[in-house]
């Protein structure tokens, strides 16, 4: 009942126009409770609570929101609407072609409607965003410290329901409950700490860096630090880049052995061997059941390849609309329909056929097919392009570009793109930047109205 109590409070706060606190609870649901208020603690899935909140607020706004409607973001609205319309076709296909029940379809599709949150977030006030961004910084700082202690001392400081395993490369316990906004605040505290207006940004940059290393994810570590270096280069601050490299080198000395072991690997599946395996037929071998000496990168691409191969021998509609909107929790139905070699075992001892935590694009292919996956990815790349165009005139646009780029890059090693909860902050940054550029928030500090207006007009 705790989860529904929080949901009820957040909706009441929204009705009485206490949007800061209401959105605070909503974003908590979207980000899986900061890995603190887990599904088990709330008694309900965070995404279910977020879904109910979204539908409720959209209905509330129909009757209570009398503010003047602004349509200054028609491109992204069109993209979202196109995806939602296609999603209804996928639902119909799942019902008519796969004969799934309405309950199975609802269970398998509800998380796909979280993208609708954009339609009320776009009405967010500037002060609300600034307040939330600062509040989330402190939450991420605290949870990052707890995560670091959890990893290096194997202390159960954060709720964790998965089986904890020792990392084969480093011998350290590997946890998968790192703070959800870790990448964002690491980028911000290094490149634009002033936007947080906090004395703890310097400490935060160090804590977030250590927390990133503690994830033990080679792709996450390499891509995120690479994106930060790219950001320094784009800013044209060679001196700052040199200082960051020197300081980072010194601070990373205690973790050098961990990094070396993680990237060199064991048992022949170091980073170089994995890349070679991909281009030498390792993907096809693994998809056919040969698991010998294969690395995780090969496994991820093989997971997608196996399902692409399956779809190539199926009716054309399945390639368009995917494998059906059904959850892996519907074990009897899913296991009777699909028999893929690759997939993690669930708590019942069955291989997950429909989803994987290892790569975003496999989830998009299974859920939405080729067409739906393309429509969904186009939203991400639109955000990337939008932030890139305006990166020189707004700090938030610059770091927004780096955040979205990082999430896209690390999506080959996780669900950073396919998990719709991760759209929440790119959406909020987009709303902030777009409203500033279009003159909704004219008093933005550092906002050059003449330059941004010129950039906007040239981009149309």
Image (tube, grey):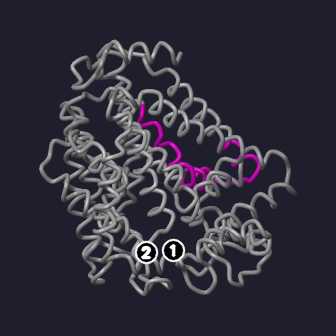
Q: What residue is drawn where x is 63% and y is 76%? A: 295
Task: Assign the magenta stretch its main secondary structure.
Answer: helix
The stretch drawn in magenta includes residue 91: yes
The alpha-carbon separation of the residues under discs 1 and 2 comes to 6 Å
Q: Nearer the viewer, residue 439 or 74?
A: 439
Please tell me how crowded label 1 is: few (under 14), some (14-19), or many (20+) other residues with Cα within 10 Å.
Answer: many
Q: What residue is drawn where x is 29% and y is 50%? A: 190
Q: What residue is drawn where x is 48% and y is 77%? A: 262
The stretch drawn in magenta includes residue 432: no
Location of residue 213 by image quarter = bottom left
Report the residue marked by disc 1.
263
Image position of 172 (left or right of 83): left
Local secondary structure at mark 2: helix
Give x and y (percent) for residue 182: 34, 57
Number of marks in picture: 2
Give x and y (percent) for residue 11: 26, 40
The stretch in magenta equals 90-118
Q: Are marks 1 and 2 in contact (CB under 8 Å)?
A: yes
Report the residue marked by disc 2.
259
Give x and y (percent) for residue 218: 49, 68
Relative height, residue 389 to residue 31 (above, below): above
């Amino acid at each position: 009942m705790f989860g529904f109590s929080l949901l009820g409070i957040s909706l009441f706060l929204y009705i009485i126009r206490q949007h800061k606190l209401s959105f605070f609870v909503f974003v908590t649901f979207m980000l899986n409770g900061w890995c603190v208020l887990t599904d088990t603690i709330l008694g309900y899935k965070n995404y279910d609570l977020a879904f109910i909140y979204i539908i409720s607020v959209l209905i509330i706004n129909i009757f209570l929101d009398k503010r003047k409607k602004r349509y200054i973001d028609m491109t992204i609205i069109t993209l979202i609407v196109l995806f939602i319309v296609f999603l209804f076709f996928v639902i119909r296909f799942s019902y008519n072609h796969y004969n799934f029940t309405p309950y199975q379809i609802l269970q398998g599709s509800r998380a796909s409607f979280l993208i609708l949150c954009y339609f009320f977030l776009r009405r967010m006030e500037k002060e609300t965003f600034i307040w939330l961004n600062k509040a989330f910084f402190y939450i991420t700082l605290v949870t990052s410290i707890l995560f670091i202690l959890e990893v290096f001392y194997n202390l159960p400081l954060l709720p964790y329901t998965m089986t904890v395993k020792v990392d084969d490369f480093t011998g350290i316990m590997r946890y998968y409950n790192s703070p959800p906004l870790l990448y964002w605040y690491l980028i911000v505290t290094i490149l634009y700490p002033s936007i947080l207006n906090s004395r703890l940004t310097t400490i935060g940059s160090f804590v977030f860096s250590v927390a990133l290393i503690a994830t033990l994810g080679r792709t996450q570590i390499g891509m995120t630090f690479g994106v930060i270096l790219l950001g320094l280069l784009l800013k044209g601050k060679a001196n700052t880049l040199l200082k960051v490299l020197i300081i980072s080198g010194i601070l990373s000395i205690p973790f050098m052995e961990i990094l070396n072991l993680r990237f060199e690997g064991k048992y022949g599946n170091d980073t170089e061997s994995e890349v070679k395996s991909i281009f030498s037929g390792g993907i096809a071998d693994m998809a056919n059941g040969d698991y010998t000496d294969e690395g995780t990168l090969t496994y991820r691409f093989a997971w997608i390849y196996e399902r692409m191969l399956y779809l190539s021998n199926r009716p054309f509609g399945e390639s368009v609309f995917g494998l059906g909107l059904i959850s892996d929790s519907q074990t009897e139905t899913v296991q009777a329909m699909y028999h893929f070699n690759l997939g993690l075992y669930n708590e019942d001892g069955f291989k997950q056929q429909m989803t994987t935590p290892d790569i975003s694009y496999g989830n998009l292919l299974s859920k939405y097919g080729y067409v739906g996956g393309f429509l969904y990815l186009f939203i991400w790349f639109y955000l990337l392009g939008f932030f890139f165009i305006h990166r020189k005139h707004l700090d938030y646009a610059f770091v927004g570009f780096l955040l979205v780029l990082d999430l896209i890059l690390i999506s080959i090693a996780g669900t950073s793109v396919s998990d719709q909860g991760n759209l929440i902050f790119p959406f909020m940054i987009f709303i902030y930047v777009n409203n500033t550029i279009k003159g909704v928030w004219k008093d933005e500090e550092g906002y050059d109205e003449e330059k941004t207006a010129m950039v906007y007009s040239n981009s149309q």
